Image (cartoon, helix red, strand yellow):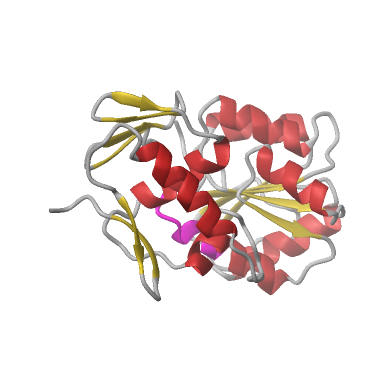
Amino acid sequence: MTGPDTSDRVENAASPVIPTGPSVLLVEDDVKIAQEVAEELESRNFRVRHESSGSAGLEVGLTHDFDVMVVDRMLPELDGLSLIETLRERQVRAPVLVLSALSAVDDRVSGLKAGGDDYLTKPFAMEELAARLEALLRRPTNSRETMLRAGPLTMDLIERTVTRNGERIDLLPREFRLLEYLMRRPDQVLTRNMLLEDVWNYRFIPQTNLVDVHIGKLRRKVDENGGPSLIQSIRGAGFMLRVSK
């Protein structure tokens, strides 16, 4: 595939110096918002490719490699969630920030279930949008990676299956995502706050035992067929997927 066409920018949004940083696909039909976002990101050395319809965004997203995407939820020709779902079905794994005027919890959940990695409601501060993109880029993901291995665990990211020593483990979607997060960080202490922010996408930290409940359920499934317990609680710190001896 070829790289993003940086010549197709929002009118009057180009900076004097051509950006050389991360590539961004911006799919937004509001010209004013698109221009402001492009100007802000290019001032931070992002390379921006803008499309104003869902169908155009889908075509470009499938034929070019991007480091990150910004997709408005309400788009002409093809809505943003359908765009993201199609990209995920076609194995495009670049992180996606969803923009929307819809701020209800159900709307946020729909955006994340469609394959979005973060959700930002309008109106928003440009500084926050840039910070969220930078956070997405720091996540240890690899768009071409299809298999994860950690000790006796193997995860197929395409088939969405997990095995331990060749025996399949049936997981719910949230359990799968939680285990994926652990497997990408073996032998590292992961705090509850990290899990709430990166697995549940919380932007504030509530008083909840949500993480402990899901870790307990996941641990029982992972250890169901015997062998040493892999998911360990670290007193006063959090949790660890221990695979080293």
Q: Residue 28: x, y in percent?
A: 77, 47
- Rendering quarter of residue 200: bottom right
Q: Is residue 47 visible?
A: yes
**Quarter location, residue 122:** bottom right
Q: Residue at x 51, y 42 (%)?
A: 175
- In the rendered image of this protein, does residue 188 appear above or below residue 141? below
Q: Is 93 in front, or is 176?
A: 176
Quarter that holds the N terminus? top left
State the count of labels: 0
Image position, residue 228 (x, y; %): 23, 45
Span highlighted in magenta in the image: 134-143
Along the viewing direction, whichever of 18 and 182 lies nearer the viewer: 182
Magenta segment includes 137: yes
Q: Residue at x 74, y 29 (%)?
A: 55
Q: Is residue 145 above or below residue 160?
A: below
Quick one: 85 or 173, which is closer to the camera? Answer: 173
Asked which quadrant contains residue 76, the reply is top right
- Image position of 71 (left or right of 235): right
The residue sitting at 35% across, 50% down in the picture is 184
Say whether residue 240 is magenta: no
**Residue at the farthest left position:** 245
Foreground pick, 245 / 10: 245
Image x and y of residue 41, in percent? 62, 64
Left or right: residue 102 versus residue 50 is: right
Q: In the rendered image, is residue 18 in sight? A: no
Q: Is residue 85 left or right of residue 80?
A: left
Q: Looking at the image, which residue sits at the far bottom?
A: 236
- State the residue at coordinates (72%, 61%): 37
Percent x, y of residue 178: 48, 48
